Amino acid sequence: MSAQRIGAEAVAAKGWLRAHKWLLARRVSQLGILLLFLLGPLAGIWIVKGNLTFSYTLNFLPLTDPYILLQSLLTRHLPETKAFVGAAIVLAFYLLVGGRVFCSWVCPVNMVTDAAAWLRSRLGIKGGAHVSRRTRFWILGLTLLLAATTGTLAWELVNPVSMFHRGIIFGLGSVWAVILAIFLLELFVMQDGWCGRLCPMGAFYSLIGKVSLVRAAAVNRAACNDCMDCFVVCPEPQVIRPALKGVAGAGPVILAGSCTNCGRCIDVCSKEVFAFGTRFGNRIEKVSPPAQKMAPACK
C-alpha cells in the first residue's frame, strides 16, 4: 500500500477535516500544553509553572508525574504532601481518559516520532530491527531498580521525554542530539521504536490504561472492508485485531492498555467503524442463526 493511499478513502468519504480531526486535536493539545509552559519564561504570563515532572497551574493546582513520584519513593526520599496530591490528580485523570493518552496527547516526543513515521512512509522505508514491545516493561523495571539502588533519579537525567520538555522551556542545547537520535531511530532502524518498544514512561502509563474508562471501539465492525488503513496508522496495531475481528469472542472495545487513544483509527476509516466510548460498551450483539428449511415429509 502506498503512502498516498493511506486514508484516501476516508478523505473522499468524509472530507479532509473529518479525516484528520483527531490528529489535529492532538497537535492542538500538545502545542497548547507547550505554550502554557512557555508563556511564563517568554512573556511573563505564569499560567503554569514547572515542567512535566511537577507543575503548578494558576498557583494552586499541583500536578505530579506519578512515574516520577514512584521513582522518588524508591530513592527513599519522601516528597512533600503536594507532590502526592498532584500525583493523585494526574492518576485520577488518566484512569478516566486512558493512561497512554499522555503519550499521544501530551508528550512532545510524540510529534518527533510521528514526523519520522510520516517520512518513513513517504520514502517507502520497510523493515528494520525487531525488538519486542515487551522490552519497554523491562526498561521500566530497570529504571525503578536504578532509583532504588542509587538513591537518585538517575533515569531522569537521560530520559528523552524529560530532557526534551526541559530543553524546550530552558533552551535545547545538546538536547537536539537526543531528539535527532530518536528521529533517526524511528526513520531508519525501527518503526514505532521509541514509543512502542523502548520508552518506560509509555510502559508505566499503559499499566494505568488497562483499567481506564474512555476507550476506542470498533462499534461498527461489521462494516469493515479490510482496507487495513487503521493498522498502518496505529502506533500499537496489535491492539486493533481482537476488537475489530472478534478474536476469541472479544467485544468491540479495545481494552489493551497499550492503546494510546490517539483516534487515528477513527480518522482514517471511511466506513466509520471506530469511535470513542467507554469500557462498558463491550456488549457483543448476538446474531440468531438463520432458520433452517424443513424437509418435505415423505408420502
Image (spheres, rainbow, N blue to C red):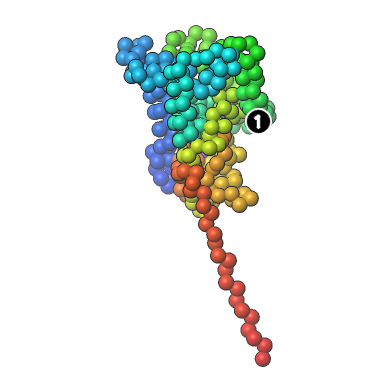
Which residue lies at the image location 52% right of the left edge and 57% below the top edge? Answer: 285
> What residue is rendered at 61% in x and 15% in y?
147
Where is the C terminus found, in terms of image quarters?
Answer: bottom right
Residue 41: x and y in percent read: 37, 11
Q: Nearer the viewer, residue 26 or 280?
A: 280
- Is residue 279 in view from this perspective? yes
> Residue 135 appears at what percent x and percent y?
66, 27
- Crowding near pointer 1: few (<14 within 10 Å), some, many (20+)? few
Q: Position of residue 210 (x, y in %)?
A: 55, 36
* Position of 138 relative to 18 (above/below): above
Q: Which amino acid does the dot numbered 1 rest on?
A: Arg
Residue drawn at x 46%, y 39% as measured from the top left? 214
Image-based side of 11 in relation to 135, left or right: left
Q: Nearer the viewer, residue 161 or 224?
A: 161
Residue at horizontal 64%, vertical 23%? 141
Residue annotated with mark 1: 134
| 225, above or below 144, in the image | below
